[in-house]
Amino acid sequence: MKGGRMPEKKKVNLSPKKPKERPLLIIPSWDMEKISANIKICVKYQEMVGICMACHSLYLVHEDYIKPESLYNFKCMGGYEQKAFLNAISYVNNVLPPVEPDDLFSAGIKDFTGGLCCLCYALNRNGDKIRQDQIDEGNSPCFGSRLDSCPYKGCSHYQTCIVKRSRFTTWHKRVLYLQNKGLYTYEIRDR
């Protein structure tokens, strides 16, 4: 104690701190320039693109066998062009919250099919006929539930049955988001 002064005691506030109030904002996980550029790529090949009526994702229309000529058109593309197109579809499908179908229509994507993407088709009751076909062939009824590989190479649905794990994860996040908003009404069967 030099100079005769006592050190001041700090006051301690024991009341809980109020958290700072922040406005509730939903910030999209995408930026508008990138999403616009990728949608433009999809519009360029719109005859090969469908919008799933259940999960609102983009998919190649030859996946649902409605327009097999689009598979021919897809195979005629160069490797770089195919990769850019598939990356554009993937980018648009990875957006959360999802791009609304009306926004895709106004951008120029015309949905000719009114169908379901492979995952919505396979994991709903719609895939039951294909699973019955698999049983009739002597295979496991696993349509749409194999991630990355399938041991039944002789199955007539081998190519359409296998789902990439990353695609399933993206689809599942999208469906959960839409279910929470009350916008996905299809019943998903157990995997």
Image: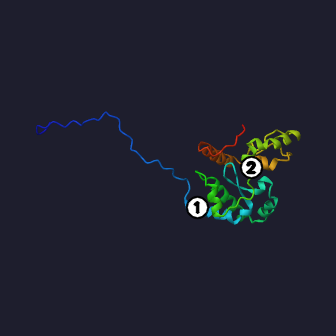
Instruction: Residue at 78%, 43% (x, y): give it.
Output: 127
* x, y percent for residue 119: 72, 47
Q: Determine the image quadrant of residue 34.
A: bottom right
- Spot the residue most to the left: 4
Question: So how many labels did they put on this image?
Answer: 2
> Which is more foreground, mark 1 or mark 2?
2
| Up-down relation of residue 89 to residue 131 (above or below) | below
Instruction: Residue at 85%, 45% (x, y): give it.
Output: 155
* x, y percent for residue 37: 61, 64
Q: In which quadrant of the rendered image does the C terminus lie?
A: top right
Label 2: which secondary element: helix
Instruction: Residue at 36%, 39% (x, y): give it.
Output: 18
- Spot the residue most to the top: 14
Q: Is residue 98 toward the left or the right of residue 1 in the image?
A: right
Q: CA distance from mark 1 to mark 2?
A: 26 Å
Residue type of the residue flagged with mark 2: Cys
* x, y percent for residue 188: 70, 40
* Residue indicated by mark 2: 118
Between 73 and 83, the one lying in front of the other is 73
How many C-alpha atoms fall within 10 Å of the one at disc 1: few (<14), some, or many (≥20)?
few
